[in-house]
Image (cartoon, rainbow, N blue to C red):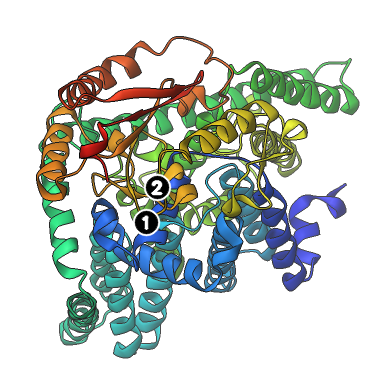
Amino acid sequence: MTTYSPPIFLERMNTKVFFFILFLYQVIFIFQGVDLSDEGFYATFYQQIFKDPEATQYNFMFWFSGIVAGAFDYVFHGLGIWGMRLAGVLVTTSTIIITYNLLKRYLNPGYLKLGLLMVLLFINNNLKEIHYNDLSALFNILTILYLFTGLKENKPGKIFLAGLLVSLCTFTRLPNILSLGLGIGIFYYGYHNKNSFKVQFRQALAFGGGFIFMTAIILGFMKVIGHLDIFINSIKLLSKMSKGGEESFYGPMVLIKNFLGTYFAATKYTIIILLLIAVVAIIANFIRKRIFYNKWIFEIAGYGIVLGIFFLFFKGTIDNEIVLYFFSGLILITTFLLFFTTTNTDIKFLSLAGCFILMTYPFSSSASLFTVGKYSLWLSFPIAIDYVFKIRTIDRLAFAGKSISLPPLLSFTDTQLKQVRKFTVITCVGACLYFSYYYPFFDKHNRMDMHYAINNKYMKGIYTTKERAGLLNELLDESSKYIKPGGYVLAYHSIPLFHYWTETTPYLRNSMPWFYEAGLFREELNTSFEEKKILPVVVQQLKKTVGNAGNWPEQPVFYDSAWHKKNAPRDSVLNEFLENHHYTEVWKNDFFKILTPPKKDSL
């Protein structure tokens, strides 16, 4: 049985074949799923960044991601959304390869591959299109790679390059400036390796110098191409959003509450899961001493538990968030244990660096771990897997230099731990595959039903359900009577993909008004009208299309009162705007409607 265990099988697999399989696995999934929100938000940015950059001013807090993906979209324009998804696959595969090469000297190859495979399986139900999260993950891994090797080899040039990469990562997503905190690792590494303060200071200077140097180059480049003022205005806008109240997604108290809540939940659920596993193992130990014990009983019981958990997945009792909590909590716990149980400074450094990214990267996200936390697992999760799989026996409890022998009922042999790990991995991998199949990003349908096309040149090779395709094709057909490429449109409130399809210009310099709380939304509407002196065609969604309604046009499982309460003030602002400017409804279906202003006021 051991011969065919997943880690040994992966260890024996040719590494290039392993990478190719992971690449191919991702490509298989990019043909399905139509998400109007996040994918449209990014795609419109890439479409406009060189054409009309001010039209997506809001996105300039992710400026470098727009430059990279916008250049890809410009070169491979005919590939549309499918092409941008392929670019995302290339970025993720690059992250996997770099992480593998960084860790291969320190981890068991089979455990390392298993960890990377599990992260990929888990993340694969998320957004495929190239965007600031997968680019940030790549830059974070590169930063740690060059910082770590620079410290090991005492090469300030590599450390300088690490600082340079932090700058690129920061302009990919502004909150990534927190990655400067990785510089603390210079003093941690120097202390444990007895480097002089002079050496540590020189290394820190190189790290900071790289950041400042690249930042100056980027700001200068922005100035030359006319992006600097737009970038500064996006920061001012972000500052306004951070002052919002409960309606705001980015108010400081909202961010802190979400951060503490999600990490507390991750730790809590992981401890509960580990305790449940321990209870099952203890019961197995008890039965093992009975006269009726037989090995096949445990095999059947193990698979029975796995099937029971899969049933809970199918019923929706356990969702994808629990898997994220478990992975994140396992990282936090194993990093803590590893810090006190290993003397290898290198693996300590890498483990702490990975945990630092896990803790800081999601901090400034409105949903914390839920959306961006997945992109923080690449380095730290394989280390956690390696740590767990290298535990051979549990028969003693050690603390503060003292150890206590555990009674036989609470002791576990290598064979028993292998069984526990086997069924845990089967459950996690099965869960990830299940959610990848039934949970394309905000197109939560059975993939067997997703073979209907959207009638748009940018959607070649992308398929969804018949019902969703029908509603969207209706919208595109009808809207073509009232809009033209380059014209101003207000797509309200979370359907920015409409802009990309129709090549229209966002009226608010933000393709997704959902991000604005009511007061800021009113301010931006008034500012746009004063500056442009024209009124846009309004395309309005009538029902929720994200989150628990990601299976639309089917109805959500329950009425989301919190969602409607949060949107009500902003909806009132829109209705006031439409009434004041005498808009007329010209078309409507179950999910969307089109409103036009008086002809004299439109473009």
Q: Is residue 553 above or below residue 480?
A: above
Question: Which SS class for mark 2?
Answer: helix
When asked about the image quadrant of residue 412, the answer is: top right
Q: Is residue 244 left or right of residue 419?
A: left
Tags 2 and 1 touching, CB below 8 Å: yes
Can you identify the residue that label 1 sits on? 45
- Horizontal side of 383 relative to 145 (left or right) equals right
Q: Which residue is drawn at 48% across and 51% down?
A: 377
| Residue placed furthest toward the front | 600
Q: Nearer the viewer, residue 79 or 31?
A: 79
Q: Position of residue 472 (x, y in %)?
A: 56, 33
**Secondary structure beneath label 1:** helix
Rendered position, 415 above or below 188: above
Amino acid of disc 1:
Phe
Q: Can residue 154 be seen in this view?
A: yes
Q: Name the residue under label 2.
A: 41
Residue pictured at 17% horizontal, 37% vertical: 525
Q: Residue at x 63, y 44 (%)?
A: 455
Residue 403 visible? The answer is no
Q: Nearer the viewer, residue 313 or 234?
A: 234
- How far apart, in angstroms, are the residues tagged by discs 2 and 1? 7 Å
Q: Identify residue type, mark 2.
A: Phe
Q: Which mark is residue 319?
A: none
